[in-house]
Image (cartoon, rainbow, N blue to C red):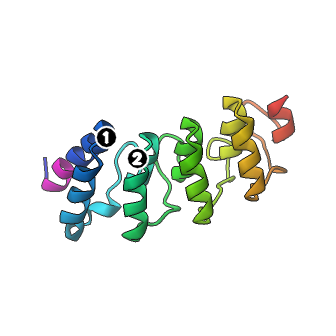
């Protein structure tokens, strides 16, 4: 296993285990190797930190200049998708206040559909307040012209 993968595994473990100081230390110490842009199966470090509700790490990553709109992870969207799926309002609002893109290119990436699926009206309201396109409709294998209203009902 190459050095970057070993370091990435250690960073992921620190994030997962809530050891924010260690995660940030590793991110800082190995920045010169490109670790800030490393992608895991969970997505970017922003995705991983959002998944585990680690705002301190998110703040560090943003201050270090990572691309806040980088897509990846299980929802294939940016880290906002992870925060919405985990229903972490503080991180959702933080991301939106950074003007993170609200991805609506497909229903899986669309955080509004995720919030509706989770039944979280508060998050739906937050996303609408921040300008999510709620008129978009999707056609695919399981639906034709599926819009927010149809999905919600």
- Residue 117, relative to residue 37: is it above or below? above
Q: Nearer the viewer, residue 112 or 94?
A: 94
- Residue 152, image quadrant: top right
Give the image location of residue 101, x and y in percent.
62, 61
Query: Which residue position holds label 2?
Result: 54
Q: Residues within 10 Å of mark 1 (few under 14, many from 20)?
A: some
- Pinpoint residue 96: horizontal percent, then vertical percent: 62, 59
Q: Is residue 69 left or right of residue 48?
A: right
Callout 1: SS: loop
Per the rendered image, the range of residues in magenta is 3-7
- Is any part of residue 30 visible from this angle? no
Tell me if residue 73 is in the magenta stretch: no
Q: Is residue 4 magenta?
A: yes
Q: Quadrant of the C terminus?
A: top right
In the image, taking residue 145 as reference, residue 74 lies left or right, namely left
Q: Secondary structure at mark 2?
A: loop
The residue identified by callout 1 is: 18
Task: Give the residue displayed 58% in from the left and 37% down from the top.
Answer: 87
Which mark, by number, is residue 1?
none
Q: Residue at x 59, y 62 (%)?
A: 100
Residue at 53% across / 47% down in the picture? Answer: 76
Confirm or deny contact between disc 1 and disc 2 (CB under 8 A). yes
Residue at 73% x, 30% y is 142
Q: Earlier in the sequence, mark 1 or mark 2?
A: 1
Name the spot of residue 65 as percent of width and height, x first: 41, 71
């Amino acid at each position: 296993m190459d050095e970057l993968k070993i370091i990435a595994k250690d960073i992921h473990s620190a994030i997962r285990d809530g050891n924010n100081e260690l995660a940030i230390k590793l991110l800082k110490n190995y920045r010169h190797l490109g670790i800030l842009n490393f992608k895991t199966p969970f997505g970017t470090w922003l995705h991983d930190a959002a998944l585990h509700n680690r705002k301190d790490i998110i703040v560090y990553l943003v201050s270090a200049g990572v691309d806040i709109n980088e897509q990846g992870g299980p929802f294939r969207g940016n880290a906002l998708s992870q925060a919405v799926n985990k229903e972490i309002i503080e991180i959702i609002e933080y991301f939106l206040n950074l003007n993170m893109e609200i991805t609506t290119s497909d229903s899986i990436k669309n955080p509004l559909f995720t919030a509706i699926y989770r039944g979280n009206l508060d998050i739906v309201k937050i996303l609408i307040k921040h300008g999510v396109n709620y008129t978009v409709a999707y056609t695919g294998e399981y639906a034709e012209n599926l819009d927010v209203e149809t999905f919600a009902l």
